[in-house]
Image (spheres, rainbow, N blue to C red):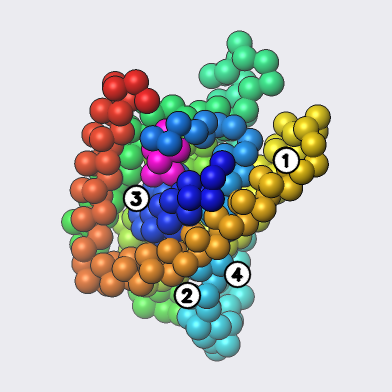
Amino acid sequence: MSLLRVVVLGLVQGLAELLPVSSSAHVVVAEKLMHLNPSSPEMTLLLVMLHTGTMLAVIVYFWKRWKATLTREHGGFRKFLLFLVVATVITGAVGEVLIKIIEKVWFRDTPHAEVEQLFSHLELIAPALALVGVLIIIAGVVRRPPSKADEAGGLDVKRAGLIGAVQGVCLPFRGFSRSGATISTAMLTGIEKVHAEEFSFALAVILTPPVVVREALRLVKAEHASPVSDLAWAVGISLFGALCAFIAGLVALKWLSRWLEAGRWYWFGIYCLLASAVVAGMHHAGY
């Protein structure tokens, strides 16, 4: 793969990942347009490395806020950490069950089936974009008053568990935006917008490393018979893509924060509905 294609994919991922519009769907569409196979081990590793780049952008952008949480009185950090653990455990349980069901039921006639085989199916990405678009619009229009103001902005174990379950549903499906779904769910349960944003991206930081490991192992398994240089090139070009995604991600985060705090959240939902129609059109066109 050329460096130019990696730059394009890195910019697409970085700009879309931290906006609630499903970066994975955008990257898959870009790969299709460039005649690449989104389901191949090289492409899935590149995708998760692009996620790593945006994860680092999240850490840089939110560091001051999280540092304030770390030093907050009355056990604020310990509570926040507890909520992250609860949400992540439930994400893992829900995601793993869904992945196993897909691999054992959906691909029951396919030897050595992997959930990544779904990633190139535009006919699945289109409805996923539509569903998350509707969820975002509902969250943006329904003005539910925040729960009691405390150091967690209304977040508690029950709400953290629900957000984690929603995040687990996002794992196997490209197009069902993780940030869009989790932030919208948090807003609908009465969590303040700023805290919903912080919690969602903190979950992304935790979730990304194990996903990177999974895809790296998948690539190593697929490339065990290939020259070491091929594997090194795939890893090196993925790291370069991560850098591009990091830079674009910082720009996207500033945009997201402004729109979220200005009450324009529902606009992202409208965009997802339009994107769903475009992806459906591409599928019918033969991509």
Disc 1 residue type (three-letter) = Asp
- How far apart in space, not on screen, are marks 3 and 2 (Cα)? 19 Å
Disc 4 residue type (three-letter) = Leu
What's drawn in magenta, residue-wise? Answer: 25-32
Residue 81's disc is 4
* Residue 188 colored in magenta in the image: no
- How far apart in space, not on screen, are marks 1 and 2 (Cα)? 34 Å
Name the residue: 34% across, 50% down: 21
- Of callouts 3 and 2, which one flags the residue occurring earlier in the amino acid sequence? 3
* Neighbour tally class for label 4: few under 14, some 14-19, many 20 plus, Cα within 10 Å: some
- Of callouts 2 and 4, which one flags the residue occurring earlier in the amino acid sequence? 2
Dot 1 falls on a residue whose secondary structure is helix
Q: Nearer the viewer, residue 122 or 84?
A: 122
Q: Are marks 3 and 4 in contact (CB under 8 Å)?
A: no
Q: Which residue in the protein does label 1 denote?
A: 230
- How far apart in space, not on screen, are marks 2 and 4 (Cα)? 19 Å
- Of callouts 3 and 4, which one flags the residue occurring earlier in the amino acid sequence? 3
Horizontal arrangement in the rendering, residue 213 relative to residue 10 (left or right): right
Q: Which residue in the protein does label 2 denote?
A: 61
Q: Is residue 189 above or below residue 284?
A: below
Q: Nearer the viewer, residue 153 or 267?
A: 267
Q: Nearer the viewer, residue 255 or 62?
A: 255
Q: Are marks 3 and 2 in contact (CB under 8 Å)?
A: no
| Closer to the eye: label 2 or 4 | 2
- Of callouts 1 and 2, which one flags the residue occurring earlier in the amino acid sequence? 2
Name the residue: 45% across, 31% down: 35
Q: Which residue in the protein does label 3 denote?
A: 21
Q: Are marks 4 and 1 in contact (CB under 8 Å)?
A: no
Name the residue: 24% across, 48% down: 271
